[in-house]
Image (cartoon, rainbow, N blue to C red):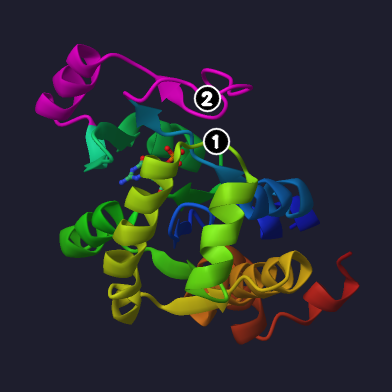
Amino acid sequence: MNSEDLEKGRNILFVISSPSGGGKTTLTRKLVERIPWVIHSTSYTTRPPSEGEIDGMDYYFISDHQFEKMAKAGEMLEWAVIYGHMYGTAKKSIEELQAKGYDIILTIDTQGAAQLRASGLEAVFVFLMPPSAKILAERLHKRKRDTEEMIQRRLEFSCHEYRQIYHYDYIVINDSFEKALEALAAIIAAERCKRDRMLSLIENKWREIIAGDRSIHNQS
Ligand code: 5GP
């Protein structure tokens, strides 16, 4: 078994939610760069692209009609209406990435996460918390992406999102980028080392050990 075999093939779904401005997009980008065999699933949305966003990378930008068609056909693993636009994860995207052996990060809102939990799908749920409501407001103003009205809507909605933290497996406070990155990387590493996931990966070697086959000590 080479080291690549030990990195891939667990097919863990990591669901990261946070209020807008919570930092999940930038942190996820870094995690994907840093950890082999972890990838971000690109969502579908009906919202128009913001400046600099690339279709197929940041989102698949599609029309209301296309989205409704996909949702109606049962092609979405989860979806939600957020600030008047539809956002969703396609089943096909997840299946394709899992078939390649990736662990997958979904950065989705609390409504989508609740749907996944209710469906009984096995996933690791992480809530990324801004250090304070004041700092979240500052971050939303600083990124200069939204109108003042939109920022106020996002802040209002964040109060509803905080109430969902009780349903998450992990809570990470994003007071410093580096610390939050380390915490998320540690969660991923720990989840990858869970006994059942390891056993299914090393099953063959494990059997040889149980059988007392001493020749394993001569293998590289
Ligand atoms: P934004 O428009 O700022 O990119 O995203 C708005 C919200 O939609 C964020 O909370 C983001 O996590 C969420 N979101 C992005 N993709 C999905 C998705 O596929 N499903 C759900 N439920 N939420 C999503």
Q: Which mark is residue 145?
A: 1
Q: Are marks 2 and 1 in contact (CB under 8 Å)?
A: yes
- Disc 2, SS: loop
Q: Position of residue 173 (x, y in %)?
A: 58, 76
In the rendered structure, which amino acid carries the disc numbered 1? Answer: Arg
Q: Is residue 15 above or below residue 182?
A: above
Point out the stretch of residues depicted in magenta: 46-75
Mark 2 C-beta closer than 8 Å to ligand 1: yes
Mark 1 C-beta closer than 8 Å to ligand 1: yes
Q: Is residue 33 above or below residue 200?
A: above
Q: Is residue 57 above or below residue 194?
A: above
- Disc 1, SS: loop
Q: Quadrant of the N terminus?
A: bottom right
Residue at the spot x=18%, y=13% of the render?
65
Q: Position of residue 208 (x, y in %)?
A: 64, 75
Q: Is residue 71 left or right of residue 97?
A: left
Of residues 4 and 58, the one nearer the viewer is: 58
Label 1: few (<14), some (14–19) or many (≥20) C-alpha neighbours in 10 Å: few
Q: Quadrant of the C terminus?
A: bottom right
For discs 2 and 1, the disc positioned in front in the rendered view: 1
Of residues 142 and 82, the one nearer the viewer is: 142
Q: Is residue 153 left or right of residue 24?
A: left
The Cα atoms of the two marked residues, 2 and 1, are separated by: 8 Å
The image quadrant that residue 120 belongs to is bottom left
The image quadrant that residue 79 belongs to is top left
Instruction: Say which residue label 2 marks.
Output: 50
Residue 85 at least partly seen: yes
Q: Is residue 71 magenta?
A: yes
Residue 197 at least partly seen: no
Q: Is residue 120 magenta?
A: no
